[in-house]
Image (cartoon, helix red, strand yellow):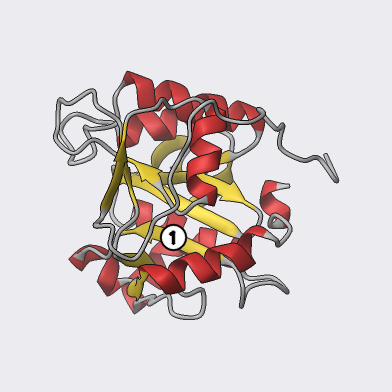
């Protein structure tokens, strides 16, 4: 609906830290994955991920060098551009299927356990978490999900069951974020991996990330998520 806004779950019951200069990538341990806690964490530049696989301990991270994708810096190869024409891309029509695809135990993202699935699904139901999905012949073949707060899109994970399917979702996401506020929007990838670097993801110091985050949070949501 035009003008619809996400539902505010209220304040978290936890006291979350603001990352400081001497902090390493791991900033805090504990808490929960309630929508109120997740939103408070993202607003402080934190995101959850266990320190070790199979661990049930919730760890909160704010990398000293943060991965971000400049919206004007996405690298789209000729083959990827061709792939964008082979798939249909949808938004928020299969969030649960996307996050389950990302949680496939055969992938590196097997840290996405039941508590993560439940927490982000509830965030989606409240209007804060979103999926960008790649379809072919009516079948979901890839996608990504993340959290949108104002001008921040915090990418969480992506998956592909067909060539370039997750990359096509990322290309579409960048297009969705390119509006009149594009120069101040923030597409967060958490870390820069070799794979993400080939797509244009760069590293910025934590201080710069937090300054850009403050600006981004004051922006309106992109039209696709509002």
Residue located at (56% from left, 57% from top) = 152
Residue located at (67% from left, 48% from top) = 225
Residue located at (51% from left, 74% from top) = 71
Residue 190 occupies which quadrant of the picture?
A: bottom left
Q: Nearer the viewer, residue 143 or 208?
A: 208
- Tell me where residue 149 appears, x and y as whole percent: 61, 50
Residue 101 occupies which quadrant of the picture?
A: top left
Q: Nearer the viewer, residue 180 or 58?
A: 58
Give the side of residue 133 with respect to residue 194, left or right.
right
From where the camera sits, is residue 86 visible?
no
Above or below, 139 relative to 86? above
* SS for callout 1: strand
- Tell me where residue 73 appears, x and y as whole percent: 44, 80
Residue located at (68% from left, 52% from top) = 224
Above or below, 200 relative to 158? below
Question: Tag count in the figure?
Answer: 1
- Tell me where residue 166 appears, x and y as whole percent: 36, 52
- Tell me where residue 209 appears, x and y as whole percent: 45, 68
User: Which residue is label 1 attached to?
Assistant: 188
């Amino acid at each position: 609906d035009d003008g619809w806004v996400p539902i505010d779950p209220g304040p978290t019951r936890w006291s979350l830290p603001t990352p400081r200069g001497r902090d390493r990538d791991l900033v805090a341990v504990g808490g929960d994955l309630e929508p109120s806690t997740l939103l408070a964490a993202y607003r402080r530049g934190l995101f959850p991920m266990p320190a070790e696989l199979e661990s049930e301990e919730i760890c909160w991270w704010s990398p000293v060098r943060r991965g971000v994708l400049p919206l004007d810096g996405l690298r789209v190869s000729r083959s990827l551009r061709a792939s964008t024409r082979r798939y249909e891309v949808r938004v928020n029509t299969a969030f649960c299927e996307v996050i389950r695809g990302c949680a496939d135990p055969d992938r590196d993202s097997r840290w996405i356990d039941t508590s993560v699935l439940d927490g982000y699904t509830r965030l989606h139901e409240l209007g804060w978490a979103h999926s960008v999905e790649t379809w072919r012949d009516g079948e979901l073949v890839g996608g990504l999900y993340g959290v949108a707060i104002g001008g921040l899109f915090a990418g969480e994970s992506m998956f592909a069951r067909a060539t370039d399917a997750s990359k096509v979702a990322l290309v579409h996401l960048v297009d969705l974020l390119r509006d009149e506020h594009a120069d101040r929007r923030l597409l967060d990838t958490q870390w820069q991996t070799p794979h993400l670097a080939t797509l244009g993801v760069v590293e910025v110091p934590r201080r710069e990330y937090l300054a850009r985050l403050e600006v981004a949070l004051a922006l309106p949501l992109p039209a696709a998520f509002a």
